[in-house]
Amino acid sequence: MENTRLLELLRSLSPAELTAFGKYLRSPYHNLREDVVLLFDYFFEKKDSKKASVFEKENVFKAVFPKEVFDEKRLSYTTSFLHQLAQNFLVINELEAENDAAFQLRLAKSLRQRGLERHYETALKKAEDALEAQPHRHLDYHYLSHLLHLERYETGARERRTASRHFQELADAADLFFIANKLRQSCTVLMHKAVSEANLRLEMLDEVLAQVERQDLTQVPAVGVWYFGYRALSEAEPRAWFGQLREAMRQQVGRFPKAELREVSTLAVNCCIRQINTRREAGEQAYWLEQVFEIYKEGLDNQVFIENGALSRFTYNNIANAGLGLKAFDWVEAFLMQYKDALEPRHREGAYLFNLASLYFRKPDYDRALELLTQAEFDDVLHNLDARRMLLRIYFDLGEVAALDSLLDSFAIFLRRRRDVGYLRQHYLNLIRFTKKLLQTPASERAAREKLRSEITDCKALAEREWLLNQV
């Protein structure tokens, strides 16, 4: 049973959720089967066991049916019942976690369907009041506003009163939700295109952009943030659009829930990273790197990047990289230690050691960096790219030509085989190409070196451009 969907689902529950699920199973309203309760209790007791035999079918069956002969089909039925109840529990949890406006709206719809007019009006009024009282003006706000106006319209249409007025309100609310959501999806598509070769289309986007500009809808928080974000991602000169995005983010800190603020912050970071990877003008990379660092520091202060008590290892890496790029070594070292325990346990040590290696590399302390880079295993493609990049520079700077030659060949093979590195593939292939040229061009051949300098300067997609130019 070790790899069953049931155990995977149960292990995803927090301790508090497991306790609540145990109570849920013991309620006769939800479950009348004692074998299902016993199966759950067995998992609850053994969930932290490291013994492989604990979840072997025979041992599980014996715990649930101690006086009976092993019957795999019967155990399968019990497992299936428990799995279904666990899924039901998740749905009920989601419903109970809804805000008051969503709850009252569901209640109003149920009351309307039963013809309970007075009860319906009371619930709908509570839904309206709760929706306006909440501070958030994000996508869900506009979606609930649309559903609320739909309720009003359906009531008016059924009774042939005020239907036309409610229809206009319904249409306006639906338009706002559609526009905001379309802009959000368009930003997601642009970010996906940057790191993959997926062919994703953006239908109706031109009409949406025109509508935003025609009606000046950027004043609507959920529209403005995603509109400025889309422009910052898509325009050739994004600074002005990015500035408006950052201003909107600061103004909307209290108007968006943390989950959506986290999404917007990720969007803003992606805008900056795209510019860092493509800009060559003096001061441009430093400007965008400073913006990334500020976004991350604000997000940490506002707890935006902490989700269910945990910090993503990818965000952990990105924050460290931003600080290291600005040579904020002491800040990064303190950050790595402070937030290490917030990482998911199975990735905690690897992420910590990788970023510690990056810190030593940037200082530079090559001996300590090499020790970590050659010992740690990285299960993320970006970690692999970054580790190879650091090793390339270390071997070059230390004059380890044999090790460098071997690395350049294996690095090129890695890049050509992987389909998930997006635009970064060409950046690193060009780094490998120019490093080989640099090794083959003696410093005494000044004309050849100047030609190489021009090629490096003119290359559009290139990692470690400044370092290469310094070596030339």
Image (cartoon, rainbow, N blue to C red):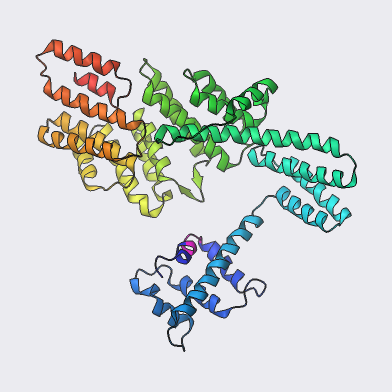
Residue 389 quadrant: top left
Looking at the picture, tell me which residue is in the foreground, 209 or 137. 209
Which residue reaches farthest top?
A: 447
Q: Is residue 416 magenta?
A: no
Residue at 61% x, 69% y: name it.
Answer: 24
Which residue reaches farthest bottom?
A: 67
Q: Is residue 11 magenta?
A: yes
Horizontal side of 419 relative to 36 (left or right) equals: left
Looking at the picture, tell me which residue is in the foreground, 360 or 242. 242
Residue 53 in view, yes or no: yes
Q: Magenta span covers which residues?
A: 9-14
Horizontal side of 337 relative to 90 (left or right) equals: left
Across and down, in percent, residue 150 comes to 77, 43
Across and down, in percent, residue 328 comes to 36, 31
Residue at 13% x, 37% y: name it.
Answer: 403
Residue at 71% x, 37% y: name it.
Answer: 174
Instruction: Quadrant for the N terminus, please.
Output: bottom left
Residue 97's place in the image compared with 353, above or below, is below
Looking at the picture, tell me which residue is in the foreground, 405 or 22. 405
Residue 272 quadrant: top left
Residue 116's place in the image compared with 409, above or below, is below
Instruction: Quadrant for the C terminus, please.
Output: top left
Residue 238's place in the image compared with 387, above or below, is above
Residue 77's place in the image compared with 374, above or below, is below
Across and down, in percent, residue 85 comes to 58, 67
